[in-house]
Every structure is written in structure tokens, then in C-alpha cells.
Image (cartoon, rainbow, N blue to C red):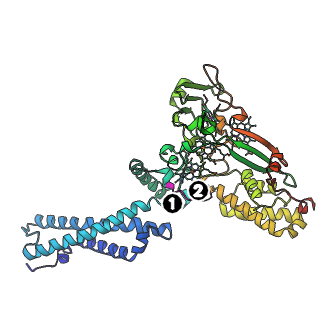
Amino acid sequence: MLSRTPLAYLASNIISLIGVALVTTSGILWLLTLPAFWRGEAGTPYIGILLFLILPGVFILGLILIPLGIALHTWRRRKAGDRGPFIPRGGELRKLAIFVVLTTMANLVMGSQFTYRAVTYMDTDAFCGQSCHKVMDPEYTAYRHSPHARVACTDCHIGPGASFFVKSKLSGAGQVFAVLFNSYPRPIPSPVEALRPARETCEQCHWPQRFSGQKFFVHTEYAADEPNSGSTTVALMKIGGRNFSGTVGIHGAHVDAKAFMQYIATDQHRQVIPQVTYTDANGKVTVYNSTDVKVTPEELARGEHRNMDCMDCHNRPTHIFQLPERALDLAMTQGSISPALPFIKKQAVAALKRDYPDQAAAAKEISAALENFYRTSYPQVFARQAADLKNAIGAVQSIYQQNVFPEMKITWGTYPNNLGHTDFPGCFRCHDGNHSSADGRTISNDCATCHDLLAVSEKNPKILTELGMDPAPQASTGGAKEK
Ligand code: HEC
Ligand code: HEC
Ligand code: HEC
Ligand code: HEC
Ligand code: HEC
């Protein structure tokens, strides 16, 4: 037998040859894209998938094929009566050994880089939020406009340590199949049952001992009348925590390190809560039962038993979907929609609440409806406040695009927000005055428990003038009175 080079030996069967080709090609491609690998990022999620997931896959497949080919080839020769030698001898063996050692070292370097990058890439916001574009579009869009836009998805959804990391990769594999076979639920269900307890996620950045004091709350709303009359609510939210006298306020009662609250919810969205068990900082246990919601002991046993944490109030810290009235109030307060456009609040709410087949159709029809209204009902406004109208249309279109996703069956109010009580049951799931204990105590629904209301829907709250703050922007004279 002639002396062969190691490559010729490896290439003596077609399977190993394919393996060698795959390893070399992906290795060379890896070298070419090394700068992107070092940065660990790619321009678009699709290039990212190619670079950080498919390329390593091809590389590893190649590595598996080489010995597999040799083994199959040897087995076939043996079966055909060939007595070998199957493994090269002498100088040929030495060359092969050196070749294998060198390439193994190179492969270890490349392989570790490949897997490291693949795993970290799967934790980037681009992969989580954009790869399965349509599926995650609603959550990703809301996230990008939220206070947590710079916090990684994985900081809340996976957190530190190995156990949840492995769990998330396993459930992630299932989700990839759901996307491939188009079998994922629409909308994606919430609450996320397997979400990690807040202690290990939120509290990495916000720890309960830090809470104290009160928060000044100012909210302006605009009426559905011609001048879009504004009125303002001012309150001090009793954030609380601890002070010299012990636990105080909202966070003091709910997330003090020594207190503990467990509740039972009987519906999927945790909106119906017939029973709450509270263990206060001194270890005293009180069970509150709803006198409103009638449940049998079996229904109670079957309900979801949950330890209350940050996410039971802050269930939308980043995927904040607004309601149309609220979103418009905010846009009008911030000035992207001018309150000087007569009836703009009413018209915009009507345009937003209509059913549209998709976001593109919505954008077109919102624009047409608003233009049409001012052209026919307020021709002077249409002519003189053209710039205001154009801005308003843009703002109304983006409110729709950030909150309604027909393809994912997400519309106004699909995901209830538990922080508050005016739009959804929220705090009043328990603080409704109808949850009482055997010893006659009730979970408080006294308004001053949670906030000091300094002004409720007032036109020009005195408190704001006293503090030297501007009242809400109102429609000045101008267009509102003209026809
Ligand atoms: C600040 C923490 C935080 C960040 C950052 C975050 N999420 Fe969430 N996410 C949550 C919470 C809390 C929920 C709702 C949990 C519940 O009610 O059980 C949630 C729910 C979801 C849901 C379920 C559907 C829904 O709207 O309730 C999806 C899907 C989701 N997140 C994807 C993402 C993606 C993708 C990113 C990154 C682009 C991300 N999340 C970033 C906290 C976060
Ligand atoms: C990686 C750090 C980090 C994690 C994890 C995190 N947050 Fe935050 N959070 C921040 C930062 C930074 C801000 C301030 C953003 C700003 O002021 O714009 C913030 C702001 C907030 C606010 C105030 C929002 C507002 O409207 O001003 C709330 C409430 C909040 N976080 C709750 C949560 C909850 C609940 C979780 C867990 C689901 C969580 N955070 C997880 C960093 C984090
Ligand atoms: C019982 C419900 C409830 C629970 C539980 C709760 N919060 Fe809050 N939190 C509130 C309310 C209400 C506010 C005030 C909201 C507002 O008006 O801005 C608030 C405000 C905050 C703020 C903003 C504080 C500021 O001064 O601006 C942060 C940050 C925050 N919470 C984080 C957390 C974290 C982290 C946890 C879990 C350890 C948690 N909260 C648990 C109800 C709750
Ligand atoms: C799962 C039920 C539940 C929900 C939801 C809930 N609470 Fe509570 N809350 C309780 C219980 C139970 C107590 C303690 C009553 C006691 O002292 O025995 C309490 C106590 C409080 C206290 C202290 C009351 C006092 O008398 O000092 C405040 C403040 C408070 N909650 C605010 C809120 C706010 C704000 C929300 C909504 C963002 C909220 N809670 C949502 C069950 C709940
Ligand atoms: C268990 C705590 C709690 C109780 C009791 C409570 N509230 Fe509230 N309230 C809240 C929270 C939390 C918010 C929302 C703050 C936010 O949107 O960030 C709120 C918001 C409001 C707002 C502002 C709505 C807006 O956005 O303009 C009004 C008005 C209000 N509450 C009135 C009342 C009145 C009146 C009572 C008594 C019947 C009452 N609340 C009892 C917790 C409470």
C-alpha cells in the first residue's frame, strides 16, 4: 500500500469527505466573519441566526461525519472480507496522529467559540424579540417604548444562574417548533406561568429595602367635547417600604422581606381572587375570604396558589399596552397631538377603536378618517392647522401600531394591567372592601390607604399653581371655536 497523506486517508470514503468539506467551509467562513464573532452581534437577526446558529451547526455536523464515515467504511470493508489494515501504520500513522492532534486543537478553539457565541446570541434581545418577527412583535414593540427598553429580555425572563438557563433553552426548543409549524397561540398567553420569581430577577436591580417615601402623580385627561377640555388628577402615591416605625405604604405591606402573602386565583388571568392569606412581619397569619365571589372548597383547591411578588402588581413593567383614551391623553399632554384641534380626542378614539384587518390598513384608514372629518366639518381648521393635523395623524397611527396587532389577535385591553384600579380590577381584586377575615378585618379600600388625592379631575388644580407647576395644556382660543 502506498503512503497516503492524512487527508487522502480521511477522504477515502464519501461520508468523511463531506465531513471534511463541511468543517473546512464553515471554518473558513468563520475566519472571514471573525470581526462579527468577536462583537457577538450581527446586523440583522437573520444574519445572526446564520452566523451564530447555522454555521456552528454545520461545523459540528462535519466533525461528526468524519469519524462516522471512517467507521462505516471500515465496517463495510470488513463485511466484504477485507482483513485490513484499517488504520494506517508506521510513518503514515505518525502523520495522521500529528494531523489529528493539530486539527483537534484548532477545532476545539473554533468549536468553543462557536458554541459560546451560539448560546450568548440566543440570549440577545435581537434574537428573543426579532427572530420570530410576527410572534414577538407586540412584546418587542411595547418593550422598546418602555422604561426597561435597555434591560435585556433575559434579565427578567431567565435571570442569573444555570437552572433557569437550561429550563429556558428546553422550553425555547419547543417554541422554535411552534413557530416553524405555525402552531403558536395567538395572543401569546399571559401570565407566564413559569416566569422566574421576582426575587431572582427584578430584585437584582430594585431591592425592597430601597423603597421609601411617596411619589408625586400628575395625570391629565381630555374630554370628548369640542375644545377637548382638560382636567387633571394629582395624588401622592404611598410607595412606602420601611421607616423608623416599621413597614409602611404599598411596598411595606406587600414586599417587606419578613411579610408573606399568598393568594388563590380561580381564572387563567389571575383576575378573580377569592382568598388571600397574609403573614405579617411578626408572623401573624390572617386569611381573607371574598364575600362577593362564591367558590366551593374544590374550586378553591383547584385554583392557582401563588406567592405574591412584584409581578402581581407590576405585571406589565415593560410590555405596556395602553388603552386608546390613556394613550391619547399622554400624547396630548406631551404635545404630539394638539388639543387646539376641535374634537380631536373624540375623533381619534373613534378611529382607533375601529376594526382593521392589519396595521397597514389601519394607518391608511385612520389618516383618511381624520382628514375627511376636518375637511368637511372644519374647513378653516383643515386649511390653517394643516401641520397640527399632520402631526396628530402620525401620532394616532403610532398609537395604533404600538398597541394593536391584528395578526397576533392583540387588541385594546387584551393584557390586563394590574397596577391601579381605574382601567382593570388591579388592586381592587383584593382591596374591594369585600375580602374579610374571621376576626372581622377587611382588606382596606379606603382611598387614603394607597394615595393622598390632592385633586381629582380638576380644570386648574390649585395644588399645581401653589407648587408653581404648569396646569395641563388646554386648547387656547384659536381653532376650537371656529367653524
Ligand atoms: C423588566 C422585565 C422584562 C423584560 C426586560 C422583558 N420582559 Fe417579557 N415579560 C415580563 C413580565 C413581567 C411579563 C408578564 C408576566 C406575567 O404576567 O406572568 C412578560 C411577558 C412576556 C411574554 C408573554 C406575553 C405577554 O405579553 O404577557 C412574552 C412573549 C415576552 N414577555 C417576551 C419578551 C421579550 C421578547 C423581551 C425582550 C425583547 C422581554 N419579554 C423583555 C417582564 C419582562
Ligand atoms: C437590569 C436591571 C433591571 C431589572 C432586572 C428590572 N428593572 Fe425595573 N428599572 C430598571 C431601571 C434602570 C429603571 C429606570 C428607568 C427609567 O427611569 O427610565 C427601572 C424602572 C422601573 C420602574 C419605574 C417605571 C416608571 O414608570 O418610571 C418599575 C415600576 C420597575 N422598574 C419595575 C420592575 C419590575 C417589576 C421588574 C421585574 C419584572 C424590573 N423592574 C426589573 C432596571 C431594571
Ligand atoms: C401591591 C402592589 C405592588 C407590589 C407587590 C410591588 N409594587 Fe412597586 N409599585 C406599586 C405602585 C402602586 C407603585 C406606584 C406606581 C405609580 O403610580 O407610578 C409602585 C412603584 C414602584 C417603583 C417606582 C418607584 C418610584 O419611586 O418611582 C418601582 C421601581 C417599583 N414599584 C418596583 C417594585 C419591585 C421591584 C417590586 C417587588 C420587589 C414591587 N415594586 C412590588 C405597587 C406594587
Ligand atoms: C392578592 C390580593 C391583593 C392585591 C392584588 C393587592 N393587595 Fe394590597 N394588601 C393585601 C393584603 C392581604 C394586605 C394586608 C392586610 C392586613 O394588614 O392584614 C394589603 C395591604 C396593603 C396596604 C397596606 C394597608 C394598610 O392598612 O396599611 C397597601 C398600601 C396596599 N395593600 C396597596 C396595594 C396596592 C396599591 C395594590 C395594587 C397595585 C394592592 N395593594 C393589591 C392584598 C392585596
Ligand atoms: C389599594 C390601593 C388603592 C386604593 C384603596 C385606592 N386606589 Fe386609587 N389608585 C391606586 C393606584 C395604584 C393607582 C394608579 C397609579 C398609576 O396609574 O400609576 C390609582 C389611581 C387612582 C386615580 C387616578 C386615575 C388616573 O389615572 O387618572 C384616581 C382618580 C383614584 N385612584 C381614585 C381613587 C379613589 C376615589 C379611591 C377610593 C374609593 C381609590 N382610588 C382607592 C391605588 C388605590
Magenta includes 144? yes
* Residue 81 horizontal/vertical position (percent): 8, 66
Q: Is mark 1 within 8 Å of ligand 1?
A: yes
Q: Residue at 71% of width from left, 47% of height from top?
A: 216
Q: Dot 1, crowdedness within 10 Å: few (<14), some or many (≥20)? A: some
Question: Disc 2 or 1, which lies upstream in sequence?
Answer: 1
Examine the rendered structure and indicate whether residue 4 appears above or below residue 367: below
* Quadrant containing the C terminus in the rendered view: bottom right
For mark 2, give the secondary structure.
helix
* Residue 366 horizontal/vertical position (percent): 75, 61
The amino acid pointed to by label 1 is Asp
* Residue 337 horizontal/vertical position (percent): 77, 61
Q: In which quarter of the view is residue 291 placed?
A: top right
Q: Which residue is mark 2?
A: 143
* Residue 412 horizontal/vertical position (percent): 68, 50
* Quadrant containing the N terminus in the rendered view: bottom left
- Horizontal placement of 26 versus 332: left or right? left
Q: Which residue is mark 1?
A: 125
Q: Nearer the viewer, residue 248 or 6?
A: 248
Q: Residue furthest bottom?
A: 2
Q: Residue furthest top?
A: 439
Question: Which label is found at residue 431?
Answer: none
For mark 1, give the secondary structure.
helix
Asked whether the viewer can see residue 272, the reply is no
Looking at the rendering, the stretch of residues picked out in magenta corresponds to: 137-153
Q: Is mark 2 within 8 Å of ligand 1?
A: yes
Asked whether the viewer can see residue 22, the reply is yes
Are circles 2 and 1 on residues that touch, CB within 8 Å?
yes
The amino acid pointed to by label 2 is Tyr
Q: Residue at 65% of width from left, 37% of height from top?
A: 427
Spatial CA distance of label 2 from label 1 is 10 Å
